[in-house]
Image: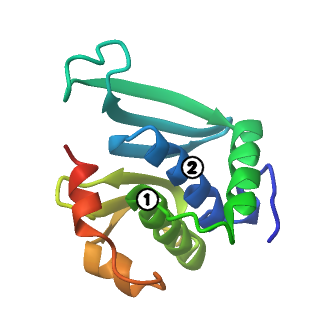
Amino acid sequence: MLIAIDRSGGYEDLLRSLGAVLDELDARAVIVRDVPDGLLVRAQMPSQRLPLRAGVLEPLERLYPSPALLDAQIRAVMRRGSGHQAGPIERSLRVVGRRIDGDHLQEARAIQGVVDGEWSVWHRRVDDGRLEVLTLSSDDLEGFGMVGPLDRGALASSKR
């Protein structure tokens, strides 16, 4: 697999790696936007400041610059063959990235839906530049080259 700092090498592995990072943070209500300096992520995550108050969410807004994305990709490659079980965001963003690559989507933004396992990908049309949305349901994600069905329980827990 080619690991590249720039995003011209494709989004599937890049978003998959970012998804693993977001699963580790237990992120929810995720929005990923490609910006010139990297990937901008907005999400909700369990509060680290208030560990005694379970269920308290705080906003996350973080730019993952290209060097951090390269590091995430390297860690992802090192996990392969280790028995690592991909989390729901990692699996979903892998498929979202595959669609971005396969459909040659421009200026894509991936938004986790309120329905378990649903993602919307806003993008510009290649032919006329108009804004368009592609919606991927959990069934779409399962049928798009995923190994085994998505764990709906894990998806539900990522939406707490």
Q: Decide: is 46 above or below 115.
A: above
Could you classify mark 1 by the number of other residues whose Cα lies within 10 Å: few (under 14), some (14-19), or many (20 or more)?
Answer: many
Q: Is residue 142 left or right of residue 2?
A: left
Q: CA distance from mark 2 to mark 1?
A: 11 Å
**Residue designated by label 2:** 18
Report the label total: 2
Q: Residue at x 38, y 60 (%)?
A: 88
Q: Decide: is 142 above or below 79.
A: below
Which is more toward the observer, 38 or 123?
38
**Residue designated by label 1:** 87
Q: Decide: is 108 above or below 36.
A: below
Label 2 vs label 1, nearer the camera: 1
Q: Secondary structure at mark 1?
A: loop
Q: Residue at x 48, y 71 (%)?
A: 95
Which is more toward the observer, 116 or 99?
116
The answer to which quarter of the image holds residue 61 is: top left
x then y, percent, for residue 150: 33, 73
Can I make out residue 119 in this image? yes
Q: Residue at x 73, y 40 (%)?
A: 66
Say which amino acid is labelled 2.
Answer: Leu
